[in-house]
Image (spheres, helix red, strand yellow):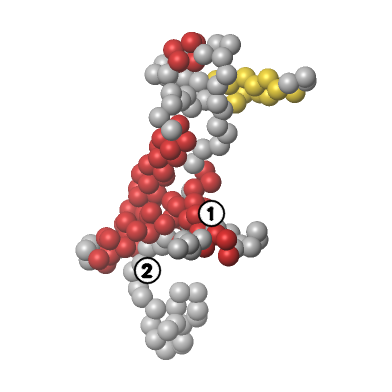
Amino acid sequence: MSKHNPAANESADTPKAIDIAASTMLGDLMACLIDELRMLHLWQSMPEEQQKEAIYRIQERVQANVRVACEVIASDNRPTIVATVESVTVKDGIKAVVTLPKSDAQRHELFDAAGLPVLIIVGGASGYYGGTDQVHPDPDQPALNGFGDGEERAAA
């Protein structure tokens, strides 16, 4: 009995579900939290401005958690140091200068790794921060008879 492999049916031009989810992860997680607030009816009692403030706070916290989750997954339980690439020089090989906080807990691991091979993972969580444009507060005044939300209202 063979297992169904959905990826085998996709063309090279078709984005995989995991790519789509990754590109909108922050927005998807924010929308999930706000949907839960709406189900508690807390959201409807908040004016639009308070909803905007809540969306901002949720975005800040979820974004920080996505960043940490990406770092944890990428590290695969190896010692890691978040550093900034200051410069790169290309000659016979590539030489990179990185800067990291002198108080980083893993700095001694770096000292001990001098002359040894290390893994460098380029990037971070920014590729997962999309989708926030889909999260909006509810307007204080809902549209009337299908008018509003970008459409002109009929004259009274």
Q: What number of labels is visible?
A: 2
Mark 2: which amino acid? Answer: Pro
Residue 98 seen in the figure: yes
**Closest to the observer, 150 or 79:** 79
- Taking the view exactly as shown, the residue that stands out farthest to the bottom is 156
Query: Residue shown at 41%/35% (left/top)?
Result: 72
The residue that label 2 is drawn on is 139
- Relative to residue 25, is residue 4 depicted above or below? below
The correct choice, above or below, for 96 with respect to 48 in the image is: above
The N terminus appears in which quarter of the rendering?
bottom left
Residue 156 tag number: none
Q: Which residue is mark 1?
A: 19
Residue located at (25% from left, 66% from top): 39
Tell me the crowding category of disc 2: few under 14, some 14 to 19, or many 20 or more residues within 10 angstroms, Cα based: few
Q: Position of residue 119 (x, y in %)?
A: 55, 26
Q: Is residue 13 left or right of residue 77?
A: right
Any part of residue 67 in sight = no
Q: Earlier in the sequence, mark 1 or mark 2?
A: 1
Image vertical order of residue 64 relative to residue 102, above or below: below
Q: Position of residue 41 (x, y in %)?
A: 22, 66
- At 32% from the left and 56% from the top, the residue drawn is 33
Q: Amino acid at mark 1?
A: Asp
Furthest-right residue in view? 91
How far apart are labels 1 and 2 at the CA level?
A: 32 Å
Callout 1: SS = helix
Q: Residue at x 78, y 20 (%)?
A: 91
Name the image quarter holding residue 121: top right
